[in-house]
Amino acid sequence: MVIDGVDEVTDADFATEVLGAELPVLVEFTADWCPPCRQMGPVLGALAAQEAGRLRVVQLDVDANPVTTNAYKVLSMPTFMVFSGGEPVRSMVGARPKRRLLEELADVL
């Protein structure tokens, strides 16, 4: 699922793209078969555009990337995790409107 402004990350590049990032990174653990994940597409695209330069937004396909998915014990889709300084600092499960997502991200931005 391609969303403008939202990059796809994989097991292979997760350490570089997410853990090594200078900005905080919002990772959506997602799956093609997950309707709420698809609903989040426009929200994440808008968030990526609005917070460009302050927050990076990426997606990780749980089916194609089991190592990272299991490492962070992701069981439900969508799961959102914010990584800052190489560590997960916030975790949220389930689709939500952009306003609520921004409220939940306020302390990490």
Image: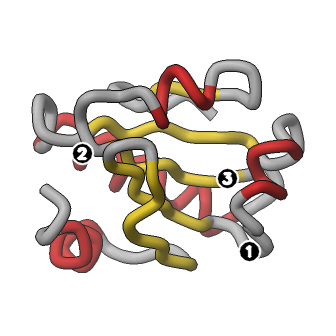
Compare marks 2 and 3 and give the one earlier in the sequence. 3
Judged left or right of residue 2, residue 46 is left
Crowding near the residue tagged with mark 1, few <14, some 14–19, many ≥20 C-alpha atoms within 10 Å? some
Q: Which mark is residue 93?
A: none
Crowding near the residue tagged with mark 2, few <14, some 14–19, many ≥20 C-alpha atoms within 10 Å? some
Q: Could you say which is closer to the camera, residue 41 or residue 86? A: 86
Residue plotted at (26% across, 29% down): 22
Tell whether label 3 touches label 1 (CB within 8 Å). no
Q: Quadrant of the N terminus?
A: top right
Q: Position of residue 64 (x, y in %)?
A: 86, 35
- Label 3 sits on residue: 30
Q: Position of residue 67 (x, y in %)?
A: 85, 43
Cα distance between the residues tagged 1 and 3 = 9 Å
Q: Is residue 87 above or below residue 105?
A: above
Amino acid residing under circle 3: Thr
Judged left or right of residue 63, residue 49 is left
Tell whether label 3 touches label 2 (CB within 8 Å). no
Q: Which mark is residue 46?
A: 2
Q: Is residue 97 above or below residue 60?
A: below
Where disc 3 sits, the SS reads strand
Tell whether label 1 touches label 2 (CB within 8 Å). no
In this rendering, the label closer to the viewer, 2 or 3: 3
Where disc 1 sits, the SS reads loop
Amino acid residing under circle 2: Ala
Q: Which mark is residue 76?
A: 1
